[in-house]
Structure formats: C-alpha cells, structure tokens
Amino acid sequence: MMSETIKIALAGQEYSVRRLTLRQLRALGIGGVAANAKRESENPAIREEAAYDRYVEVIATALSRDNPEMTAEAILEAEVNGIGEVLVAVNAIFEFSGLVPAGEAQAAASNTATSTVA
C-alpha cells in the first residue's frame, strides 16, 4: 500500500512528498532541544544563511525517499522562483507532516515573505 502524498513545486518541477518519518524528524532536529549557534548568531547574514540551509535541509529530507537525486546540493543549484516558492514547499511539508495546523503554515510563510522583501 502506497503512502499518501502531496505535490510540491520547485524550480518548475513537481515532486511527490510523503509525510516525514520519525527518523527524518529526528535527523532534522525538529522538536528537539539542541541549540544551534548558527541560527542564534547575532550576525543577520549568518542567521539568514542558516534559514536558507534549514529550508533546503527540510526539502531534501522530504524528497529523499522518492527522489534521492534531489540532494541539498541539487536543491541549492535549482533555479527556483524566489524564496516564496521555497517557503510554500517547506510549509506544505510541515503541514502535511502534522507539524503545524492547517492554514498556520501559510500565514507564517506570508509573514516571512513580507519581512524578507521589505
């Protein structure tokens, strides 16, 4: 029996994504208590780079089971349609995996996208 999937779009390509497994959540450190100095840096450029790295890590992890060629490196090289496309993908993955209530991810994405553009 095939797991339920959603579609995410990235760089003009559609990908099927299954819910994140507990192993994947653990590998991503989601729900964990470990602090990440890079994400907590006082340097805004380092914090922004860490945010991009995190988005890429989430997408690569979600794609890894069915699209192993979509590594973090491949995603970093993808010609995406702006950060908004990346945020939509990450938020869809989080929502589908039950990490945020339906609709909350979209609100967070639009707030982040707005503050990124400003």
Image: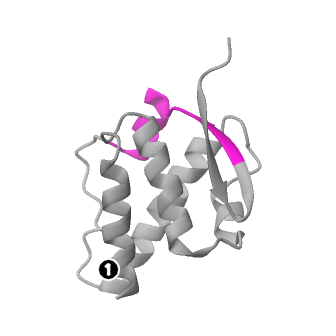
Magenta stretch contains residue 25: yes
Where is 62 relative to 58, above or below? above
Up the image or down, 12 lies above or below 28; here it is below
Name the spot of residue 33 as percent of width and height, x first. Answer: 22, 45
Q: Quadrant of the C terminus?
A: bottom left
Q: Is residue 45 left or right of residue 1?
A: left
Q: Quadrant of the N terminus?
A: top right
* 71 relative to 34 in the view: left or right: right
Residue 76 position, x and y percent, is: 64, 68
The part of the chain drawn in magenta is 15-30
Q: Quadrant of residue 95?
A: top left
Judging by the rendered image, the residue that carries numbered circle 1 is 115
Left or right: residue 24 versus residue 65 is left
Task: Please state the horizontal and vertical placement of residue 2, each as a whole percent of the image.
Answer: 67, 18
Where is residue 16 drawn, in percent x and y?
Answer: 67, 39
Residue 38 visible (yes or no): no
Of residue 31 and residue 33, the one placed in the foreground of this image is: 31
Q: Residue 64 sits in which quadrant?
A: top right
| In the image, farthest residue toward the bottom | 118
Q: Nearer the viewer, residue 33 or 57?
A: 57
Write the residue at 49% across / 36% down: 24
Q: Residue at x 45, y 60 (%)?
A: 54
Tell me what residue is drawn at x 66 percent, y 60 percent. Answer: 10
